Amino acid sequence: DGFLGAGDDAARSALLTPLFTPTETCSLEASTETKNYLVLSCLDNVVTECRFWRYADGAFSLERCLKGEVGLSPSFSAVDAETSDDLWRTSDGYTQPTTLALAAASSPDAAEALKALPAFYDAGGVTTQQFTAASADGTAVPYFLVSKEGLPLDGSTPTLLYGYGGFEISLTPSYSAGIGAAWLEKGHAYVQANIRGGGEYGPRWHQAALKEKRSKAYEDFEAVARDLISRGVTSPAKLGCQGGSNGGLLTGNMLARPTAGSTLFGAIVCQVPLLDMRRFHKLLAGASWMGEYGDPDTDDWSFLQRYSPYHNLDEATAYPPILVTTSTRDDRVHPGHARKLVSKLLDLGKGPSTFYYENIEGGHGGAANNKQRAFMSTLAYAFLERTLAGAAAGGKKVEL
């Protein structure tokens, strides 16, 4: 009654208790309720922080904040929100398989471990560090570096840089058996970049790379690559990048942009990619992405053509080796994008460094079952091993 009877917005605001206020570095990811608590999951500089608000005597009070560790992603969900304050706590990270525990909202750090998925690779001695790189406009871009302890800073480590940068999707730490077994166990390094276009810092981070500002995402990714090189983690000949779908547009630009290419990368994996920005809106689900990229049938083409990889290839440029993969039955990003880029590279005489695989099943995921997923993953890592490390484990040459 007091709220409805308030005379103006200022009076109504005075009756409200803000439970979350975004900042330049902190965004809201999720929330869950129990009988007496509201639990907010936030990302603070891409590290999870859970805030426990208790409701009692008609008011909320912040009872505790549980800060996560770098490289781990904990989350909470109610066991029975109507009758108890018990919570399921799920967590995983680059080196930790998904783990389930039972906790009380009143003491969430004292959780009882219940079950965990098995480990699929030896994570002994593997550590996660977080760094920032300065983008072209000075923006600080965070990234995670996963590698063996005591990594030599002499530029000798084969390193895989992964990114997405679109649709407000946040890249947070998660467990991947494939990355671990095929890459980290060999002593290589894995990097996940939190570039603009994603949601790591909320809507503003996404909006900073929309339409005519899309190049900000690519500048961010290049900045992370340069930072890895300047730190001595790796070198251009040992650095590869990987991305799929919108991330395929990202890696396609790492091929075509004069500020990237062989200057920064020794290999590129481009999966189910978006590459022809002149016709993307006429193919499959492409029209629904004009809010993200723009409309090429309008003046938007003036900026779209600057980040359309298909239109920015030339014969005089020496490109790094690239593996392009797609699916005949992709119902979101038409396989024509991948086919056209590869065909153009061949026409420009880049055949020896261009590799292509099209699976005839699988939709946008690129594979229809686990056997096909394993094959596609092995194909990508075999390509990266050959181009960045030169030989497989045991000294045997990898052939594609």
Image: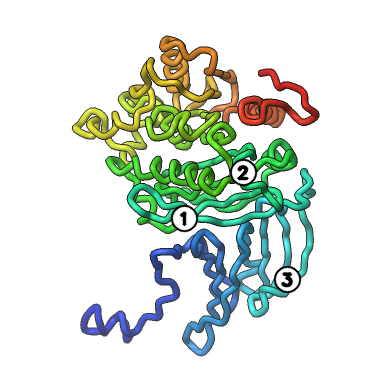
Give the mark nearest the N terminus, 3 or 1. 3
Tag nearer the camera, 3 or 2: 2
The amino acid marked with disc number 3 is: Ala
Give how far apart the Cα atoms at labels 2 and 1 are.
31 Å
Q: Are marks 3 and 2 in contact (CB under 8 Å)?
A: no
What mark, if any, has residue 111 been given in the picture?
3
Asked which secondary structure carries label 1, the reply is loop
Asked which secondary structure carries label 2, the reply is loop
Q: Position of residue 141 (x, y in %)?
A: 44, 53
Tag nearer the camera, 3 or 1: 1
The amino acid marked with disc number 2 is: Asp
Left or right: residue 218 versus residue 62 is: left
Residue at left offset 79%, top offset 46% = 122
Q: Position of residue 179 (x, y in %)?
A: 67, 40
Q: Position of residue 6 (x, y in %)?
A: 26, 84
Is residue 268 in view? yes
Find residue 188 and report its image quarter.
Answer: top right
Q: Position of residue 41 (x, y in %)?
A: 54, 65
Q: Looking at the figure, which quarter contains the N terminus?
A: bottom left
Q: Which residue is mark 1?
A: 200
Q: Are marks 3 and 1 in contact (CB under 8 Å)?
A: no
Q: Looking at the figure, which quarter contains the C terminus?
A: top right
Asked which secondary structure carries label 3, the reply is strand
Is residue 332 in view? no
Rendered position, 122 above or below 76: above
Give how far apart the Cα atoms at labels 3 and 2 are.
42 Å
Label 1 crowd bin: few (<14), some (14–19), many (20+), radius 10 Å: many
Rendered position, 5 above or below 66: below
Residue at left offset 23%, top offset 28% = 297
Q: Which residue is mark 2?
A: 154
